[in-house]
Image (tube, rainbow, N blue to C red):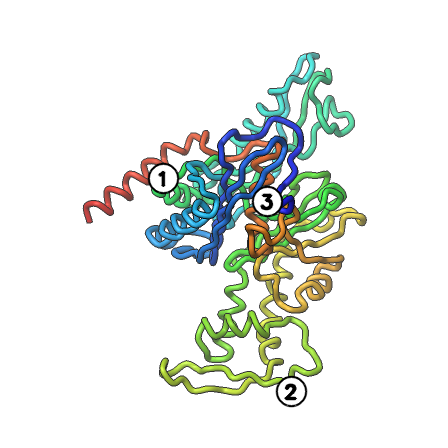
Amino acid sequence: MNMSNVIQLPRHEPRTRAEPVAVLDIGTSKMCCLIARRRGDRLELQGGGYQLAEGLRAGEIVDAEAAEASILAVVHEAEQQAGRTVREIVLGISGGRPESVVATVDLELGGRAVGPGDVTHALALARAQARSGGVEIVHALPVEITLDSGQRLRDARGMVGERLRIAVHLVRVASAALYNLLAAIERCHLDVAAVIAAPYAAGLASLSEDEATFGALVLDLGAGVTGVARFADGRLQQLTSLPLGAQHVTQDLAFGLSTGRAQAERLKTLYGSVLPRAGDARQHLEVPCLGDPTQPPVQIVARGRLTEIIRPRVEEIFQLARARIDLNRLPVTGRRLVLTGGGNQLEGIVELAEEIFGMPARLGRARPFDAGAVQDLTAATTAVGLLRWAGEDDGGLTFGASSPNRDFTARLARIGQWLRENF
């Protein structure tokens, strides 16, 4: 057994008993499915699949049939590699414009000890109060617990008091975007055990224990969405997202150089940079122009021209992300930025991030695995975070199959099937 394909789990009752453990990360440009099996307190990776994501824009479905085909393809690829069939998955999503809100819940104890169900009851109350039309709560996490206005507690269970107060961090998403994804997955004959926000999963996979405890930011630069998550005290404290990503850099290149999207993506991947270099003006590239597909006219472009186009867009994304996250809540010891996502492969991205955010930065990667069954660690970061979530207990409540809206998604699936069969 390759130990690099093993993720260590804490010694407690696992969150779900489903075998095998399967996770599905749905992004704008790619989908990733990982399948693992439990070996005591560990998860052993058995297979993985990657496919281009069709029918999605900014992490949301715009073509249900194309999206379902991509889901089926990526799950089938992972099943073939693992030699096992899955029926239940943990889903990671980047769409739906996720954002954080904080709610405070008070419970009267009457002098009794805090029971194991009191915190769960408080989280459920906070989630129910925050739900409204067009919004669904995907995470409810306790961030501050006090008894009788006393000191902050790590764990209040077993302590005696009159009033329990819990500050709850809620992550909400647009319900329509979420339900459309759930319905598409159900039409693929898969059950969704839980739904996890992609920036949260990216942080679980890439942050060290010290970073999560002392405080850190995770910036997940995807193709169509950039997610930002702030961690402190070992918990997710804040999450937000921007409808901008690496695809917008590609679009800028295609427009600025009057070339096709495929050529622009290739130029970005091979020569893209956000930092000007001394030799860029002397290095020239042949760029096909828009025209006859068989014999397109060719222009000669200095490499420095690519940097002039790429850098402003990346600066805009970073500045907007910085404006949406509360940097003042990060202590001096926790001023650390971790970059994840495929869009962070541009040359000089770490240096630019340090300049704009004013803190040390590094590229994040999935810690538990090497190149074994997963060939691209950067692309698998969120999926590995989903595996971590499936095996650990974050102390909160997460939107899943037990949600009261499951019947609604089932109705959507039946309606979609009827339309396909009759029209």
Q: Is mark 3 in CB contact (under 8 Å) with mark 2?
A: no
Q: Position of residue 237 (x, y in %)?
A: 66, 41
Q: Is residue 38 left or right of residue 416?
A: right
Disc 1 versus disc 3: distance between alpha carbons? 24 Å
* Direction front: furthest residue: 1
All told, the count of numbered labels is 3
Q: Nearer the viewer, residue 62 or 285?
A: 285
Classify mark 3: residues with Cα within 10 Å, few (<14), some (14-19) or many (20+): many
Q: Is residue 254 above or below residue 211?
A: below
The answer to whether residue 394 is visible is no
Which residue was labeled with disc 2?
282
Residue 357 drawn at (x, y percent): 71, 59
Q: Relative to the observer, which residue lies in front, 143 or 368?
A: 368
Rendered position, 155 above or below 195: above
The residue that appears at 52% across and 60% down in the rendered structure is: 223
- For badge 2, the amino acid type reads Arg
Disc 3 to disc 2, C-alpha distance: 43 Å
Sequence-first disc among 3 and 2: 2
Decide: few, some or many residues near mark 1? Use Cα within 10 Å; few <14, some 14-19, many ≥20: few
Between discs 1 and 2, the one toward the N terminus? 1
The quarter of the displayed image where residue 231 is located: top right
Question: From the image, which quarter does the N terminus lie in?
Answer: top right
Task: Write down the residue under mark 1.
Answer: 189
Residue at numbered disc 3 = 385
Dot 1 or dot 3, earlier in sequence = 1
